[in-house]
Image (cartoon, coloured by chain):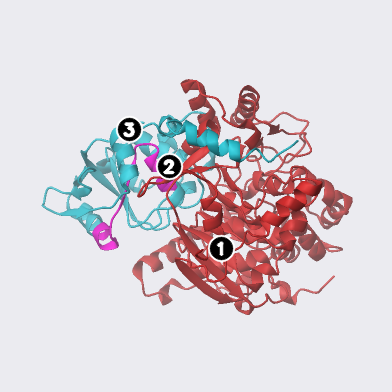
Chain colours: A cyan, B red
Amino acid sequence: MQAFKNFTGLVAPLDRPNVDTDQIIPKQFLKAVVRTGLGKGLFYDWRNQPDNRFVLDQERFQKATILVARANFGCGSSREHAVWALADFGFKAIIAPSFADIFRNNCLKNGMLPIILKPEEVEAIFQDVKRHEGYALTVDLPAQTVSDEFGWSARFEIEPFAKKCLLEGLDDVALTLVHEKEISAFEKAHPVPYKS
Amino acid sequence: MAAETLFEKIWKNHVVFERPGEPALLYIDLHLIHEVTSPQAFEALRNSGRKVRVPARTFGTLDHNVPTTDRSLPIEDPDSRIQVEMMRRNCREFGVPLFDLGSREQGIVHVIGPELGLTQPGMTIVCGDSQDPTHGAVGALAFGIGTSEVEHVLATQCLWQSRPKTMEIRVDGHLKPGVAAKDLILGIIGRITTDGATGCVVEYRGAAFEALSVEERMTVCNMSIEAGARAGMIAVDEKTIDYLRGRRFAPKGAEFDKAAAKWRELRSDEGARFDKSVRFDAASFAPQVTWGTNPGMVVEVTGKVPDPAAVSDPSERRAIERALEYMGLEPNVPIQDIRIDRVFIGSCTNSRISDLKAAAEIVRGRKVAASVNAMVVPGSELVKEEAEKLGLDKIFREAGFEWREPGCSMCLGMNPDILRPGERCASTSNRNFEGRQGKGGRTHLVSPQMAAAAALAGHFVDIRDWPKN
């Protein structure tokens, strides 16, 4: 995993609650056997409509790297393809009042920062995106803040362990294998229960 | 010793390593894998030169992509075929047992785990599939994971987990006749909403769940994720023990009795405390039908499609308007006036033998409405075999249902079983998201009994008024 670096990026607004991972990446893209190239499937059924109304079809959001969304973002299927697709499109952070658990975990494993802000703070970002063409936010993970050029800022919480893994780009498996002794001891005390 | 919840007992037994304030390294007893969420994990193992740490705790099946029609023919869709072939290759190369097409054990991952006795009380069970909490029905801690975590479990047989909150969903009293386990869980999700249990491991408690069969408990636990829960579980009782006895991978003879004695302790202690608790009366639940595009958008079968104009919260109003537009429904239409085109009886929620029996009981001697295309997809080869032994296939076929081969099928339509744009389906699956069963398809989630009756009538009916066979 690549280490997470602070950045300033364009914000794209997705003003719908309970966005499920079936919408983020529909089933036909789950037949992929690699993690790359899934950006073309991102919000496939909502994009490419004749009216080009969907936010990610609009010219002004093509270079967005931060998605601001509503509550319970990423609910439903555990498909990690949802995060791979968001990352492939260019997103590096997602801001919402709440995330579904598995989706949030999947973000953390891929260097994507899920930022939980209060509903009123999320609402303020939606309003600012409407007001200012090219509205951008700066994400500072060590300080746990997002801020804009007009002096607005908000603080977010993240577990210290997850923060450390993101900042150092730690390989989870390597981190676990440090505990080989403990795992082996556990296995000795708990033999495989199946006889076939 | 302080009173502990069922969750706390299982958690404590699986902590391999823990530092204060950090996630715990949890040992995983059983890892179930399927062809959709594992290829990238195996690829990563290959790239880093790692092995599967404990192949004997890892079991694979083919379910999402597989055709439910003639299995002697090759899989037509090239991408599906590649994924299936890659699964075979990965399992072979890494020494993981695979329940392949044509084997007697093949089926939907959450149907075969318990059916084969792989799923056992007190275990930690993961799968790269959000419906994994199904296995919690026998008193296990089971949760869905992403592909990176699949890789991690393959390589280490462990997972880093932050301790979730605990939530009690208590339903006292008894369900009324005609109200199925599916209605109970849909009704609960309607009341607590689709993120009502986010961050929590739910324990379903009370007389209503105790009265359910183990398979019915699986239907309840299966949809825990639809309320946002990490996992759902139900305490072990004699039904659990009886369910497991004699299953292929369950302990045998004296070892079974020894295991059963331990399993009987897997219940929350008197006075154990939960972080959150909700209570309902079983008698307050009726047959349910979803009208919208998430499982919390649900109403009783005697109810009507909601009217957004009657909702004051603007964001909720917009969500309802949008759902009604997608679903092609007008406000205030009685649920029983909604006509359907398709019926799907199947999925890891409702494709076990008791589900098929319940549906067949409604269907026996009757005909599917001329305007409806209906199908039954058993959850596994063993379910199919037993159903055919009981003659259920004949009942369904004679009524005009299609009788298919086991797999996930139209729950998510990764195989050719999909809805066409605008088609409306009564489905026993777990998700009514936009496009879930096919782009533009409209899904209404119901119980197997309600789906069967809808197939015959051509529209939703109240199963409680339906003439008994």
Mark seen at residue B203 = 1
Q: Residue furthest front?
A: B1
Q: Is residue A61 depicted above or below A3 in this figure? A: below
Give the magenta-colored segment's residue range. A103-123
Residue B385 forms part of the magenta stretch: no
Mark 1–mark 3 CB contact (< 8 Å) = no
Secondary structure found at label 1:
strand
Label placed on residue A169: 3
Residue B143: where, in percent of width, then height? 54, 49
Q: What is the C-alpha distance between the residues marked 2 and 1?
A: 25 Å
Q: Residues within 10 Å of mark 2 (few under 14, many from 20)?
A: many
Residue at 32%, 32% in the rendered image: A169
Image mark 2: chain = A
Compare residues B211 and A151 and report the one nearer the observer: B211
Q: Secondary structure at mark 2?
A: helix
The numbered disc on residue A106 is 2
What is the three-letter code of the residue carrying label 1? Glu
